[in-house]
Image (cartoon, helix red, strand yellow):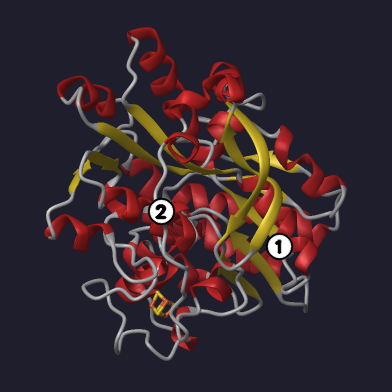
């Protein structure tokens, strides 16, 4: 396929991995690179890139799967809303199977709740118009890539005068989570594989504190095998050669230094930053996006009251530690035995971008 095959060429991949090995030989220490984005985790596993790495380069998965980092408290609220008689829940498909404290949206749907899978938040506008006597709640889960679309949905609702569409917002920002991991000192990270999609929106600016304050090289990388190997090579060169850490863009065909200013201003118009909870990590300052006061009529939490059950976590699921990069799925006692994609116990096994799902499908621990 034109424009895809060029980025999967075996000979080029081989050359790049040889170059990575050659440079990695110049250091005796272990180099830990974290891929922050769940799409990278899956792409790295699918293309076998871990097996091409020399022994002293370790690739670690981080907290970049939006479904995985959404805490049970949010899911329990969504489930409680779905039980109300006059509510339609609109959600992306990967949320539906995620277990909450005692149920999931899938279970509620099979019990008769009106839960609809949509491919874009804009579809919920059509659903609201078709159901003027119902309250339509869109589950706004995602990072900087999803937030502008949700912002645009709110603006369109306002223009169309809709009064029955609401957003349950759990949007999160990636760079504050990267800094929280560095602050926690749970793991020593030597370089970040920064998310390509998110960076098309935010550009390089939000990553600058990671290099300036923490001295950690960061490269924005695409999702094809050659992108990933090239990006790893750029990181290894920075680390092994001991140059001043910097943010570099490997994924230049999609990412500009300034990102997408239109999407940024749309996001800023509708949302404001605030502290929010990440599964496994806890509250991260200024890492969440909350609907501004001026648009609060679209905020489900502020407008639709519901009784939410007390949050419980499965005692044996270690998703939290996996999301922090402290443990890997094979260290979970339920991995493959009890917890599988058909019977997921935690969110990291549900989402196609989840680390447990990637290990299950492609990994040899
Ligand atoms: Fe949780 Fe399942 Fe992953 Fe274990 S294997 S951490 S139970 S999602």
Look at the picture and state if 2 lies above or below 9.
Answer: above
Residue 28 position in % (x across, y down): 77, 79
Q: Dot 1: what SS? A: helix
Q: Is mark 1 within 8 Å of ligand 1?
A: no
Taking 300 as reference, is 98 left or right? Answer: left
Residue 17 position in % (x across, y down): 54, 62
- Which residue is at 39% across, 72% downward? 346
User: Which quadrant holds the N terminus?
Assistant: top left
Most distant residue in the top direction = 159
- Which residue is at 31% across, 43% downward? 5
- Which residue is at 30% across, 43% downward? 91
Place residue 123 in its image quadrant: top left
Residue beneath label 1, please?
181
Res 77 label: 2
Q: Dot 2: what SS? A: helix
Taking 60 as reference, is 25 left or right? Answer: right
Front position in the image: 257 or 101 = 101
Q: Is mark 2 within 8 Å of ligand 1?
A: no
Q: Quadrant of ligand 1?
A: bottom left
């Amino acid at each position: 396929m034109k424009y895809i095959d060029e980025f999967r060429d075996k000979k080029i991949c081989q050359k790049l991995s040889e170059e990575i090995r050659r440079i990695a030989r110049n250091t005796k220490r272990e180099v830990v690179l974290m891929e922050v984005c769940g799409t990278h985790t899956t792409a790295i596993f699918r293309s076998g890139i871990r097996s091409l790495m020399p022994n002293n380069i370790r690739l670690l998965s981080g907290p970049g799967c939006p479904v995985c980092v959404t805490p049970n408290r949010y899911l329990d609220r969504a489930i409680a809303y779905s039980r109300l008689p006059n509510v339609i829940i609109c959600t992306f498909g990967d949320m539906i199977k995620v277990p909450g404290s005692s149920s999931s949206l899938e279970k509620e749907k099979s019990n008769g709740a009106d839960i609809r899978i949509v491919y874009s938040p804009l579809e919920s506008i059509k659903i609201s118009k078709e159901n003027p006597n119902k309250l339509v709640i869109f589950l706004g889960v995602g990072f900087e890539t999803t937030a502008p679309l949700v912002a645009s949905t709110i603006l369109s609702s306002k223009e169309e005068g809709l009064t029955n569409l609401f957003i349950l917002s759990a949007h999160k920002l990636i760079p504050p989570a990267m800094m929280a991991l560095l602050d926690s000192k749970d793991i020593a990270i030597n370089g970040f594989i920064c998310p390509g999609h998110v960076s098309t929106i935010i550009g390089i600016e939000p990553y600058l504190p990671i290099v300036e304050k923490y001295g950690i090289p960061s490269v924005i990388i695409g999702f094809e095998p050659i992108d990933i190997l090239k990006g790893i090579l750029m990181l290894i060169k920075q680390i092994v050669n001991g140059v001043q850490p910097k943010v570099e863009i490997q994924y230049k065909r999609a990412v500009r230094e300034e990102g997408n200013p239109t999407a940024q201003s749309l996001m800023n118009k509708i949302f404001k930053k605030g502290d929010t909870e990440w599964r496994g990590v806890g509250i991260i300052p200024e890492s969440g996006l909350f609907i501004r006061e001026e648009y609060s009529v679209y905020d489900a939490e502020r407008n639709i009251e519901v009784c939410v059950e007390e949050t419980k976590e499965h005692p044996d699921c270690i998703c939290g530690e996996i999301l922090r990069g402290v443990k890997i799925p094979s260290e979970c006692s339920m991995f493959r035995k009890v917890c599988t994609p058909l019977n997921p116990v935690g969110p990291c096994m549900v989402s196609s971008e989840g680390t447990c799902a990637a290990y299950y499908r492609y990994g040899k621990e």
